[in-house]
Amino acid sequence: FSMHSAKTISPMPWMSEEELAGLFEALQGDVAQPAVLLVGGCVRNILMGVEVEDIDLAIVHKPEKVMKLLKEAGYSVIPTGLQHGTVTAVMNGKAFEITTLRHDKETDGRRATVEFTHDWLEDAKRRDFTINALYMDLSGNVYDPLGQGLGDIEDKTIRFVGEAAQRIEEDHLRILRFFRFHALYGGQDYDAEGLKACEAGADKIKTLSRERITQEFLKILASDDPQDILDIMFERNILKDLDFSASYPEKDFFRYFCNFQKKYRLSALSARIFVMAGLSMENMKELEEYLLLPKVFLKDAIALEGALNLSDLSCDSAVRESVYRFGRSTTAQAIMVELVQDRVMNSYASKALEIVQKWDVPDFPVSGEDIMNAGYEKGPEIGEALRSLENWWIEQDFKPDRDACLEKCVCKFK
Ligand code: ATP
Ligand code: MG
């Protein structure tokens, strides 16, 4: 098999940046056939007109040679995954992941032993989906060794490379990746063979590490309209245990919430998860059977629950109280939840969100020392008095100044 480009497109501006161009120069040498090519997500995204996040490269040289050539050219080299043939090259803060062409020799559903090859077709065959098995050089020549990727990009078809059932047997994570890529890049229809194979293999997802499951699942949740994908996934018994829709106060609750996040450009993944979990901390804990959520997600969920337990966020003073107690971003998410629940009028939401953004959060003007000076004994009462004074100050919509607060403190407690 020799590489012929299937199509040429005009290169993206970033493809001529010196860090990438220098890397190609260092690794290509003066061989006629391509030695190094862009591959995977970056090529797919260019062809789909989607922003490119990170740059992966495939190369015919073995990792040792790659590292040597890179160092000679002045790149820092990190052996990120040597046993899989992956090294990361860094220059001026830009990182490139470079993987030697390979095929999987042994697989057990979770990890693979790999063998290096010089054959681009072999390398394409071990990749998960046809749209991820496309290669490109810096002049915009696109290579499609399988002869399917370009067509599938055109039709937005997420199709396993080779036989779906077998590919899932090799690596169960591909089930979640199937839905992830569908959520992000797929069209209306699912590839029937792929969908069937995912359903048949669903039980095995449990055997994967929570880290790997989480990575894919969060990307699904972060997609534009995750409800559609989750519906299909749950219908097909994929992570069915995570279906908390029975605890939704109303149908399509989650969908509406995601739509508000989109409308106001306030997408917070932690809030999405909490809403998906039916606004229940108990469900949130159940997620941990499959997902390893960042600690901050749980903290965010607790704060959101707190904000939702305040009075309805349907007037300025309530919004200010929430911002003061739980912060701007939690309050914004709470407003959107309440929008779905009809506790906040649609017509008030923009005003509420403006307060969230622009209101200058005041500092409580009284300290523990002030309370002591007012005659309190050192001890737990000081904290209590301070909190109760603060609550009063919040109730007065943060208007009383320091003197007014101290006066109140003296009247009330002496
Ligand atoms: P993105 O970076 O936007 O999430 P990506 O396609 O680059 O998407 P990565 O997870 O970065 O996804 O993987 C890079 C490439 O490696 C993929 O495009 C695919 O060709 C291959 N790949 C990754 N994971 C697998 C897998 N589990 N099985 C087979 N091939 C895989
Ligand atoms: Mg990638």
Image: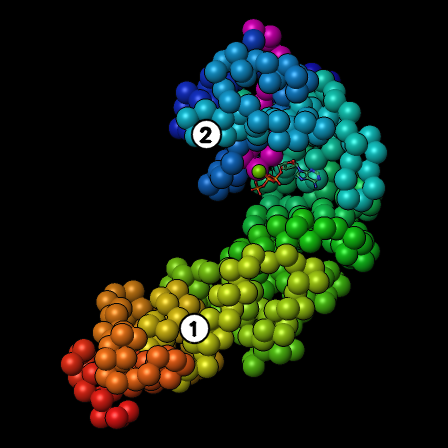
Does residue 301 lie above or below 202 as drawn? below
Quadrant location, the C terminus: bottom left
Give the image quarter of residue 101. top right
- Disc 1 to disc 2, how far (Cα)? 38 Å
Please name the residue shown 42% across and 68% down the image: 330
Describe residue 243's horizontal placement relative to residue 259 as left or right.
Answer: right
In depth, the one of 185 and 21 nearer the eye is 21
In depth, the one of 412 and 150 nearer the eye is 412
Scheme of colours in the image: rainbow
The residue carrying pointer 2 sits among few (fewer than 14), some (14 to 19) or many (20 or more) residues within 10 Å by Cα, namely few
Residue 91 in sight = yes
Please name the residue shown 45% across and 24% down the image: 91
Please name the residue shown 49% across and 20% down the image: 75
In depth, the one of 243 and 392 nearer the eye is 392
The residue carrying pointer 1 sits among few (fewer than 14), some (14 to 19) or many (20 or more) residues within 10 Å by Cα, namely many
Q: Secondary structure at mark 2?
A: strand
User: Where is residue 401 shown, x and y percent of the image?
Assistant: 17, 78
Task: Find the magenta span and give its range.
Answer: 30-43
Amino acid type, residue under disc 2 in the picture: Lys
Amino acid type, residue under disc 1 in the picture: Ala
Residue at which label 2 appears: 94
Residue 345 in sight = no
Residue 204 lies in the magenta stretch: no
User: Where is residue 333 shown, x and y percent of the image?
Assistant: 43, 69
Please name the residue shown 37% across and 67% down the image: 327
Residue at which label 1 appears: 334
User: Which quadrant of the frame does ligand 2 lie within?
Assistant: top right
**Ligand 1 within 8 Å of the CB at mark 1:** no
In depth, the one of 82 and 368 nearer the eye is 368
